């Protein structure tokens, strides 16, 4: 592997860590229960008739969350359908077709940002802003809220409530907003458009007719889709588009934004549970899985496609189909694993055209449940589910009822954690299975053979884990896929959130067990190893057969020259 | 629960869905009028055909370099259709550049992710120098210097790849030929 | 208290009668209504049934997706898998049953003498013990069996309790105090007792014991329930992973244009290999065996929950006497003031103690004999009169004619010598204070008006106890000594024994308060107790071990009864509790880690026709797809049998901090579980090939 690849990899993660640690500390100050609401916040609570000091039980918290998310989904659906009559539609786009509109509404409310449409030719500027950008903020804020509820579950002793959803939602939005504004300005400076025009005309060098470029308020949407682990691009090509991501500098900024908040929240967590080592451990666990898969992807992509070399193609820069020349293999692979580790789903290269093992990494990162960084908030609370399983197994192995941060892990927590880990996996497998036998599945494929299977597997891995990226060759705007993926997105989001909140509620009600030599410390390399091994083992055992029939067999075919 | 839902949804739509993008649009239009309106030179790739121009990446959009509809090919590496496509492109590149005997730079025969890639690798630009020199009558040294002048390195020496903006390169090439520079995007 | 060792010789794992009975029982347990309680093994049974149908289908129609022979072989081994798991459970239950049968012999229906009034002389009627009600009063005389559990209201008698405790030495039972409880099924050896019945037939201590060791009343413990949830979730995940493999393979075969969908027989085989059958099959055996180990340690737990809680305990409240120190104080030194020969003091002290049958008194006689060669003499040979200890004089001794030798507390002796015209010197006072400061008890000896000096009585800390406490500390368990001594004495003994904390001048109320205090801080507290006044504290403690010699109230309040009445048993109980959890956790890890090798065996085999390239994943280079699947299935079945002894015995337990224990168990059962199946499956493959089962 070239030294440049390793240097860019290393530099990227060093910068990420350097930014995430202070941001995490700032986040902890902003999100802590002790933080006092500002005056505008108090006006907002008064307007909404919410007492910010009131504490909700986990059930009430979940109910508020679900109603708010449902209302958001309906609003997006309504705006999409009605966009023809709404302002800021300079391209005079018609209302969005019902299947796609529903799929998109669910997709943005669940923080998935799966796109069954091409942005620049489907959504009016008003829809992009008022519907989609809003959801980019509040869906991420919802995730942070659930995480805060879990943190309260771990830190409170014999408490009934897990916090106030409306306060968490507001606080988290206030965390996202200044960051998004900063990123918008930085991206515009790099050449990302930010205008209310829908089109600009550019003279062509070799052609008398001008080239028409779709534009709009791109930078503001890109900033939050990256920071909020949303991923839904303004353009169809997402961050591969030279206007959505014009330079290596903008690429670096956008890459950082993918991982920044999920990484920072680890440190926020450490600070809020008053044991920073716990935050570092979770961060280290994430890197332990992300880095090897990134290296695997780099190796596979730089190695290239033997069949192309046989045709006389110079493979020294690696496999470039679907990649942008300004990013090349290294920045593209780094992005591909980051965007799937975090449940971002934006792309700066076409994953469908990746070599099989470089495609396997992203696919498996999603299948692990979007817990390696994962969504803003959702990644960390998802990872805590795996921590619960790891703590449980290790607790038994040391002969003591398992406990995490002083809270006993008992049957109820195991039930909920199992449910939350199980259901998205089930949705991936069942979705892929159904789509591989009904006629709509094979008919939608962009590639034949094992790669075609990978397209289906990727689609359901992405939607059931709220990632949103795709093997783009698959045609997903038909009724079968818009509906089945919408169901998967709902399962992946709410059938995790509800059990997680239930865990938060039951943990909050527990006493705290004092630590002793008999307590298994959860900040040690040993526990790190166990946690990582648990995640890898469960993830591998669940998905190895499917992966064997997709990327693994395709890799063997690629190397064997067969097709 | 209904009242807070309606209030928060309305307030956040106004704040994050309207105030945030509109406010930043105003700011961007004031502070970065060129970038905010996609008006730089070669911000998006263009189609170049004919031996007198440096050719860019193959584009998977219809028509190629369609600025209103970006897209990659999404063809997988084991797809026979993909291999056939590359085979045809390799043959075409070889035919157009008969003096080049080495392997064809990969970016000349593989489609970009967006279909709008304005860049090429330095090697791919150099690969075309002999052909362009022959077609335009410009000395190869001049073209080499032109490529060098339009080569951008990695950001901070670390991020991204060294590259040549094909639109800017061809614009300079046309200027060199004395054609009025009237196609700056505006 | 008996001298039984803390580690009783374990009963052999495989007794012929138990194994034979267990094999029969293993087949009886195939009843689906019983199997459904164990979801993992129920899935295996359904799978076995399904492959058997596939075999029948292949035989009768002549067509199946695999050969009939293969389907039959897979079916047989899948049924074996279920039977082996049942065998493990039956073995564990069988061991309990053997114990229960012994106990049941003691529970006979006998004729009891029901008294009309609670006194010996009252009229009585003969009534079947089964008809006795709570509150009835019965008379039991020498040679008779005690009908059901009760409380002595009148009389003193010696009772043979060997039917329950296995201890042949008789014990004294009397009314009032802490030795008033009698147990049904035990035999009166002498005298008579009037007993008030405290529990009715069928609910006696003996009945509870039988139910417990038989596992009839065994309820799942909290951790077992949580583990069940995890295992069920894993089973569902693997069920989905294998079921979806069928459509996946249909798609693959269509796309590849070669091969066929994965045969259903092979999918069932894969499913059974993947779901955690090893732990699923052994889980209940581990639980039963844990209870069995308790029984072998002569501890009867009233629930599995209590056994499990024992593993979580992090504070042990231990009674000083009997647990930390030997039963009683002993004389350890004679300390005369200047001018008095130590031998004279020893002689006088021995004289004063000759007729003193208290352990302290005897220890003085022994110390004088061993230290100064003074032989014990008989009081009556010397013509001496014994002056016993009374609450008024607070001293004892002998009168030899006019000579009055006395020993007692400093103030009592001081009064005595003053009354005799002597003086209690400042030097003796200094010695007395010095001894007390060291945590010992000073006993002053006087011969008439002369004070001869001080006998130092000391609590003797049991040998090895300090090391034991250090071990507990490494495990994260705090030890707290409970004593009625004054704080000074208590502190000294606490330091000598190495306990973490002590509660001096303890009253039952203080004990209770201290337990609550620990619990409020989140600790789990274990304690032992025997007296009625211990009952509130026992009821409050998370793990409460009542001594079998104790009162009925104490036994009712505790959640375990130690038949040996050995307070040190608490430590063993904690170990058994931990060991049970560790065995479960380690075998779970082992079971899941095993799956990796099975994938390497089965996935290439399942897709051999569609994607022959997957052969590279067959790192074991197995003979053929059929032999690969068979080897994995056979391994999966045999590993259950191979691990039965481990499940029954529990995994090796050594006290160490949690991280050390985890590291060791992860290495053995995690890494071991990952590696072991590879050579085993390869070996089975070679064996099957060598036997010609799969022709090459």
Image (spheres, coloured by chain):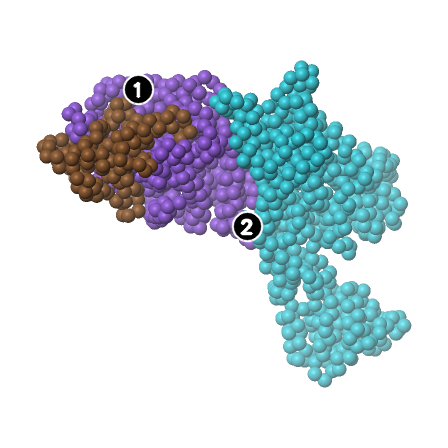
Chain colours: A purple, B brown, C cyan
Q: Position of residue C618 (x, y in %)?
A: 57, 36
**Res. C133 visible in picture:** no
- Label 2: state its secondary structure: loop
- Label 1: state its secondary structure: loop
Q: Which mark is residue A298?
A: none
Which residue is under mark 2? A519
Q: Is residue C92 left or right of residue A21?
A: right
Residue, x 68% and y 41% (percent of image)? C643
Q: Is label 1 in contact with label 2 (beta carbons under 8 Å)?
A: no
Q: Position of residue B148 (x, y in %)?
A: 21, 43
* Chain of the residue where label 2 is placed in the rendered structure: A
**Res. A350 visible in picture:** yes
**Mark 1 or mark 2: whose residue is earlier in sequence:** 1
Residue, x 52% and y 45% (percent of image)? A530
Residue, x 32% and y 30% (percent of image)? B90
Q: Is residue C119 left or right of residue C442?
A: right
Q: Is residue A537 left or right of residue A304?
A: right
Q: Quadrant of the N terminus of chain C?
A: bottom right
* Chain of the residue where label 1 is placed in the rendered structure: A
Q: Which mark is residue A96?
A: 1
Query: In the picture, residue C326 is in which quadrant?
Result: bottom right
Relative to the observer, which residue lies in front, B111 or C215?
B111
Q: Position of residue C684 (x, y in %)?
A: 67, 37
* Structural crowding at the residue carrying mark 1, measured as other residues with C-alpha within 10 Å and reported as few (<14), some (14–19) or many (≥20): many
Relative to the observer, which residue lies in front, C137 or C348?
C348
* Cα separation between marks 1 and 2: 56 Å
Q: Is residue C378 above or below residue C191?
A: below
């Amino acid at each position: 592997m070239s030294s440049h690849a390793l240097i860019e990899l290393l530099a990227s993660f060093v910068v990420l860590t350097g930014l995430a640690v202070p941001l995490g500390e700032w986040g902890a100050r902003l999100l802590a229960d002790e933080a006092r609401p500002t005056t505008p916040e108090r006006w907002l609570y008064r307007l909404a008739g919410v007492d910010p000091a009131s504490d909700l039980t986990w059930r009430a918290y979940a109910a508020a969350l679900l109603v708010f998310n449902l209302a958001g989904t309906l609003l997006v659906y309504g705006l999409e359908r009605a966009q023809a009559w709404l302002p800021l539609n300079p391209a005079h786009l018609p209302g969005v077709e019902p299947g796609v509109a529903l799929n998109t509404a669910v997709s943005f409310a669940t923080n998935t940002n799966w796109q069954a449409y091409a942005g620049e030719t489907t959504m009016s500027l008003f829809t992009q802003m008022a519907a989609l950008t809003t959801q980019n903020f509040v869906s991420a804020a919802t995730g942070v809220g659930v995480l805060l509820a879990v943190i309260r579950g771990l830190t409170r002793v014999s408490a009934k409530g897990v916090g106030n959803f409306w306060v968490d939602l507001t606080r988290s939005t206030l965390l996202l907003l200044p960051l998004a504004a900063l990123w918008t300005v930085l991206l515009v400076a790099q050449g990302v458009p930010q205008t209310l025009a829908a089109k600009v005309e550019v003279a062509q060098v070799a052609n008398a007719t001008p080239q028409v470029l779709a534009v709009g308020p791109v930078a503001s949407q890109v900033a939050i889709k990256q920071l909020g682990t949303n991923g839904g691009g303004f353009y169809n090509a997402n961050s591969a588009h030279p206007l959505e991501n014009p330079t290596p500098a903008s690429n670096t900024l956008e890459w950082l934004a993918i991982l920044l908040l999920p990484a920072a929240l680890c440190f926020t967590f450490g600070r809020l549970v008053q044991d920073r080592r716990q935050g570092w451990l979770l961060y280290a666990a994430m890197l332990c899985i992300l880095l090897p898969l990134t290296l695997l992807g780099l190796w596979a992509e730089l190695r290239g496609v033997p069949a192309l070399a046989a045709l006389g193609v110079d493979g020294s820069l690696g496999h470039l189909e679907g990649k942008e020349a300004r990013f090349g293999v290294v920045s593209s692979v780094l992005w591909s694993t980051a965007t799937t580790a975090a449940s971002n789903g934006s792309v700066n290269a076409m994953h469908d055209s990746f070599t099989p093992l470089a495609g396997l990494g992203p696919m498996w990162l999603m299948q692990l449940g979007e817990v390696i960084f994962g969504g803003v908030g959702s990644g960390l609370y998802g990872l805590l589910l795996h921590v619960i399983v790891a703590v449980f197994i290790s607790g038994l192995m040391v002969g003591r009822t398992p406990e995490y941060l002083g809270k006993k892990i008992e049957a109820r927590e195991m039930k909920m954690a199992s449910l939350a880990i199980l259901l998205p996996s089930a949705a991936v497998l069942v979705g892929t299975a159904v789509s591989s036998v009904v006629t709509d599945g094979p008919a939608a494929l962009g590639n034949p053979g094992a790669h075609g299977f990978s397209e289906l597997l990727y689609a359901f891995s992405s939607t059931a884990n709220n990632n949103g990226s795709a093997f783009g060759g698959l045609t997903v705007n038909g009724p079968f896929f818009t509906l089945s993926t919408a169901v998967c997105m709902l399962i992946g989001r709410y059938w995790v959130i509800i059990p997680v909140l239930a865990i938060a509620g039951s943990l909050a009600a527990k006493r705290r067990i004092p630590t002793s030599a008999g307590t298994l410390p959860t900040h040690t390399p040993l526990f790190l190893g166990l946690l990582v091994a648990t995640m890898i083992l469960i993830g591998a055992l669940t998905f190895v057969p499917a992966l064997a029939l997709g990327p693994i067999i395709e890799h063997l075919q690629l190397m064997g020259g067969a097709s | 629960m209904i009242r807070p839902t309606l209030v928060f949804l309305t307030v956040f739509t106004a704040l994050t869905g309207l105030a945030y993008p509109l406010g930043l649009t105003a700011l961007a239009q004031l502070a970065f009028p060129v970038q905010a309106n996609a008006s730089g030179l070669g911000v998006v790739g263009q189609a170049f055909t004919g031996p007198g121009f440096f050719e860019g990446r193959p584009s998977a959009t219809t028509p190629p370099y369609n600025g209103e509809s970006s897209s990659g090919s999404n063809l997988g590496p084991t797809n026979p259709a993909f291999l056939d496509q590359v085979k045809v492109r390799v043959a075409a590149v070889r035919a157009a550049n008969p003096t080049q005997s080495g392997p064809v730079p990969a970016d000349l025969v593989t489609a970009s992710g967006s279909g709008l890639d304005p860049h090429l690798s330095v090697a791919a630009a150099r690969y075309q120098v002999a052909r362009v020199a022959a077609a335009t009558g410009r000395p190869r040294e001049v073209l080499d210097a032109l490529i060098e002048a339009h080569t951008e390195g990695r950001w901070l020496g670390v991020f991204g790849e060294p590259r040549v903006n094909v639109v800017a390169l061809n614009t300079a090439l046309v200027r060199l030929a004395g054609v009025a520079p009237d196609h700056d995007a505006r | 208290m008996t001298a039984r060792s803390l580690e009783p010789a374990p009963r052999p794992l495989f007794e012929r009668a138990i194994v034979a009975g267990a094999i029969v029982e293993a087949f009886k347990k195939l009843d689906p209504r019983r199997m459904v309680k164990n979801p993992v093994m129920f899935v295996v049974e359904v799978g076995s049934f399904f492959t058997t149908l596939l075999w029948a289908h292949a035989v009768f129609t002549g067509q199946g997706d695999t050969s009939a022979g293969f389907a039959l072989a897979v079916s047989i081994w899948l049924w074996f898998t279920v039977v082996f798991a049942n065998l493990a459970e039956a073995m564990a239950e069988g061991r309990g049953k053997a114990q229960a049968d012994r106990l049941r012999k003691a529970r006979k229906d006998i004729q009891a003498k029901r008294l009309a009034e609670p006194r010996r002389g009252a009229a009585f009627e003969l009534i079947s013990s089964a008809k006795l009600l709570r509150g009835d009063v019965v008379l039991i005389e020498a040679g008779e069996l005690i009908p059901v559990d009760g409380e002595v209201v009148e009389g003193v008698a010696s009772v043979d309790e060997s039917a329950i405790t296995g201890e042949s030495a008789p014990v004294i039972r009397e009314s009032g105090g802490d030795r008033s409880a009698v147990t049904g099924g035990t035999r009166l050896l002498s005298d008579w007792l009037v007993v008030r019945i405290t529990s009715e037939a069928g609910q006696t201590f003996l009945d509870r014991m039988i139910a417990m060791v038989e596992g009839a009343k065994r309820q799942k413990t909290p951790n077992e329930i949580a583990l069940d949830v995890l295992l069920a979730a894993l089973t569902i995940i693997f069920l989905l992973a294998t079921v979806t493999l069928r459509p996946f393979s249909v798609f693959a075969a269509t796309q590849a244009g070669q091969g066929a969908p994965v045969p259903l027989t092979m999918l069932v085989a894969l499913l059974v290999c993947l779901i955690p059958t090893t732990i699923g099959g052994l889980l209940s055996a581990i639980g039963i065996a844990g209870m069995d180990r308790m029984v072998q340690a002569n501890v009867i737990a009233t629930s599995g929950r209590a056994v499990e809680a024992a593993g979580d305990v992090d504070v042990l409240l231990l009674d000083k006497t009997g647990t930390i120190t030997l039963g009683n104080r002993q004389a350890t030194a004679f300390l005369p003031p200047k001018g008095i020969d130590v031998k004279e003091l020893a002689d006088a002290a021995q004289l004063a103690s000759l007729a003193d049958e208290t352990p302290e008194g005897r220890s003085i006689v022994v110390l004088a004999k061993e230290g100064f060669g003074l032989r014990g003499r008989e009081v009556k040979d010397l013509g001496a009169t014994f002056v016993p200890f009374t609450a008024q004089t607070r001293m004892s001794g002998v009168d030899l004619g006019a000579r009055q030798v006395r020993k007692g507390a400093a103030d009592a002796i001081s009064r005595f010598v003053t009354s005799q015209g002597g003086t209690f010197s400042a030097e003796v006072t200094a010695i007395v204070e010095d001894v007390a400061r060291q945590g010992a008890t000073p006993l002053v000896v006087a011969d008439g008006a002369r004070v001869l000096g001080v006998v130092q009585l000391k609590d003797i800390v049991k040998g090895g106890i300090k090391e034991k406490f250090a071990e507990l500390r490494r495990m994260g368990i705090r030890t707290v000594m409970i004593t009625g001594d004054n704080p000074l004495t208590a502190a000294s003994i606490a330091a000598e024994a190495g306990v973490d904390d002590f509660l001096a001048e303890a009253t039952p109320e203080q004990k209770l308060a201290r337990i609550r205090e620990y619990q409020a801080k989140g600790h789990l507290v274990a304690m032992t107790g025997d007296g009625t006044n211990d009952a509130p504290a026992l009821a409050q403690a998370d793990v409460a071990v009542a001594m079998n010699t104790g009162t009925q109230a104490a036994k009712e309040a505790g959640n375990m009864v130690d038949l040996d009445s050995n307070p040190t048993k608490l430590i063993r109980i904690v170990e058994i509790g931990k060991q049970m959890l560790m065995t479960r956790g380690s075998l779970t890890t082992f079971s899941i880690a095993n799956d990796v090798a099975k994938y390497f065996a089965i996935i290439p085999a399942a897709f051999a026709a569609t994607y022959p390239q997957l052969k590279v994943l067959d790192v074991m280079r197995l003979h053929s797809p059929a032999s690969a699947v068979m080897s994995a299935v056979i391994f999966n079945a045999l590993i259950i049998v191979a691990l039965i002894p481990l499940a029954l015995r529990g995994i090796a337990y050594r006290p160490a901090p949690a991280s050390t224990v985890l590291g060791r168990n992860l290495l053995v059962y995690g890494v071991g579980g990952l590696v072991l199946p590879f050579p085993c499956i390869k070996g089975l493959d070679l064996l099957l090939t060598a036997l010609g089962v799969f022709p090459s």
